[in-house]
Amino acid sequence: MQADHDLQPHDARRQTLQAVALLRRAAQPDQRHLGWAVLWLVLAALLEVLGPIMGKALIDQHLLPHRLDWPRMAALLAGVLLTGWVASGLRYLQLVRLSGLAMRSVRRLREQVYGHVLRLPMAFFDRAITGQLVSRVTNDTEAVKTLYVQVLFVMLDSSIVLIGTVCAMAWLDWHLMSIVLALLPAVLAIIWLYQRWSAPAVTRARALRSDINGHLAESIGGMSVLQASNAEARFAARFRTTNERHYEARMAELRANAWLLRPALDLLNIVLLASVIFAFGQRQMTATEVGVLYAFISYIARVIEPLIQITMQFSQLQQSVVASARVAALLDEASAPEHAAHDKAAHNKVAHGAAAHDNAAQGKATQDEAAHDLGARAPTTAQRPARRLHDANAPAVALRHIGFAYVPGQPVLHDLSLEIGQGDFVGIVGHTGSGKSTLLSLLLRYYPVQQGAITILGAPLESIANAEFRAEVGLVPQEPFLLAASARENIAMGRDLSDAQVEAAARAAHAHDFIMALEHGYDTALGEGGSRLSVGQKQLIAIARALAGQPRILLLDEATSHIDSQTEQIVQTALDELRGRVTIIAIAHRLSTIREADRIVVLNHGRIAESGPHAQLMQVDGGLYQRLYQLQQLAA
Ligand SMILES: Nc1ncnc2c1ncn2[C@@H]1O[C@H](COP(=O)(O)OP(=O)(O)OP(=O)(O)O)[C@@H](O)[C@H]1O
């Protein structure tokens, strides 16, 4: 992710263009409303300009010459009063339209940004800071609303009033109008100065707000560690510093506004009035010119006020542009490869599978049948895309000469080759930093393969459609991630699974009994992050979730490292029952978990050091595995 402080001034033009394009795209489907809103605004502005002209006519043609044409005078007076009133009504109408447009744009943009974040490759999240990312999706997208409702509305409105007023002044008395216009460059100079003064503060304030979000998210996420390490005071001090800097930036913005903008523009208003009255005083007064003076005095406010309004919007505009540029930068991050063509085919097959599932549901598949499906992989298995990877003779996973580096020039895996047969149970062990998780990340396509090739069930990894890949490969991570939802929802994870399928998966993971012991069984809400469950129980739910997808390859990433021996026993039993039917690749720190594996691969500094069943590896005197095992036995 582009760090917040990376928004350097030399990028400003490109960012502004990016932001404008993004905002235009966000409002694209609502263009009709934008058209109407502009029309209402033009009408409102014209009415506002018309008011003083009617006032002038009333003074010059009726009041001063005592020409008492009552119906016409009443019409003109009503015109003066009504124009303002109708203009307000029209403004309200257009504000409603623009607000709706803005809300819908924010909704669209948020969905787009969130959808994009979901598709970003894992490498992105190595760099990303959660709080800033959240800020992108919530605050920064909201800037679009401010832009449309506040900035665009006021700027458009003020510009139209300004142009209309200048035209009306030119029509009434071009000489006086030129006096007013002559002073306008002073307004532009004030705006320029204000921009120079406030722009850095605006950018700084936004970046710091994002830092505050990041800081909060980090602290809340790690609250237990933070409190346990007595770090409250240090974190509070760090937060105070950021908050203080944010306050300073906002104050600098405010000072630019209060000390430069308002006073300078107010002064200019007075100078303009004085100039017009002075110029008037130099003339031979005729009766008709009193109306012109009235109109000009009314118009001067209508020239200055829109200008003030426009300049006041600049800081808001800057904020919106900076925020939109951030969103645009995030949307610019390349997504993980989509394998779209394959996905389309896979989608059709999912639909086909869903139909099969419906038929099965009508036939009232029993729990036992579903359980059988899960284990025995009957050909009529519901809810699955049809297999395209079915090559009975191909290895489940084959790695050929894999090399990988997170940082160029610092390889983590070296020329690694490994073949795992279908239905095999393979354990991967090694000291910390030996590359086990990296290997798993490559298998999971979190990172693209840099050197060598990986095939899954005979198909090159990068050629497999996303839906198909996710159906074939299940993952049980080290830290089970549970939603604040029911046990059922946590296992189904949005997949259209029947109750029987969810239960079958839970039984296979040996999670069924403890779920049934909860007060509402599968419908019991598990609390945020599954807070109602023990770590072991959470892990069993995570295993059930992976099994519910009926994968042919199951990856376990140190799934037993945080659980007690009793739960580990349960996991071992579950794995045992899957043996031969599902290919299991388990990374394990706890060697007891993989002791019974068909083969144990020992990694050392990114290379395969040893490989074989437990008994065989234990025979290698002074071997890595033997040492690791003995160390664990001693520690136990
Ligand atoms: N996202 C990353 N960016 C840069 N380097 C990384 C990243 N992840 C891991 N590494 C480095 O790659 C090497 C292998 O790490 P890896 O996590 O694969 O080891 P591991 O065997 O799984 O270790 P552990 O048992 O402690 O989880 C380590 O030196 C680690 O510092």
Image (tube, rainbow, N blue to C red):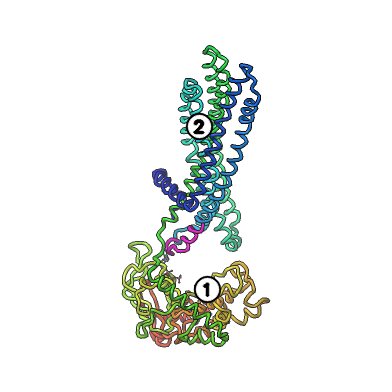
Q: Nearer the viewer, residue 385 or 326?
A: 385
Badge 1 element: loop
Q: Position of residue 29 (x, y in %)?
A: 48, 53
Mark 1 Cα-neighbour bin, 10 Å: few <14, some 14–19, many ≥20: few
Residue that sits furthest to the right in the current view: 519
Relative to 429, does residue 529 appear above or below in the rendering? above
Relative to 255, does residue 576 appear above or below in the rendering? below
Q: Position of residue 443 (x, y in %)?
A: 40, 73
The circle on residue 495 is 1
Q: Position of residue 249 (x, y in %)?
A: 53, 42
Relative to 469, does residue 225 appear above or below in the rendering? above
Tell me the chief SS of the magenta region: helix
Instruction: Name the amino acid, label 1.
Output: Arg
Q: Nearer the viewer, residue 457 or 289?
A: 289
Instruction: Name the amino acid, label 2.
Output: Gly
The answer to whether mark 2 is within 8 Å of ligand 1 is no
Badge 2 element: helix
Span shown in magenta: 109-124
Q: Nearer the viewer, residue 301 or 534?
A: 301
The circle on residue 575 is none
Quadrant of the rendering where the N terminus is positioned:
bottom left
Is residue 259 in the magenta section?
Answer: no
Residue annotated with mark 2? 164
From mark 2 to mark 1, how far is it between C-alphas?
Answer: 59 Å
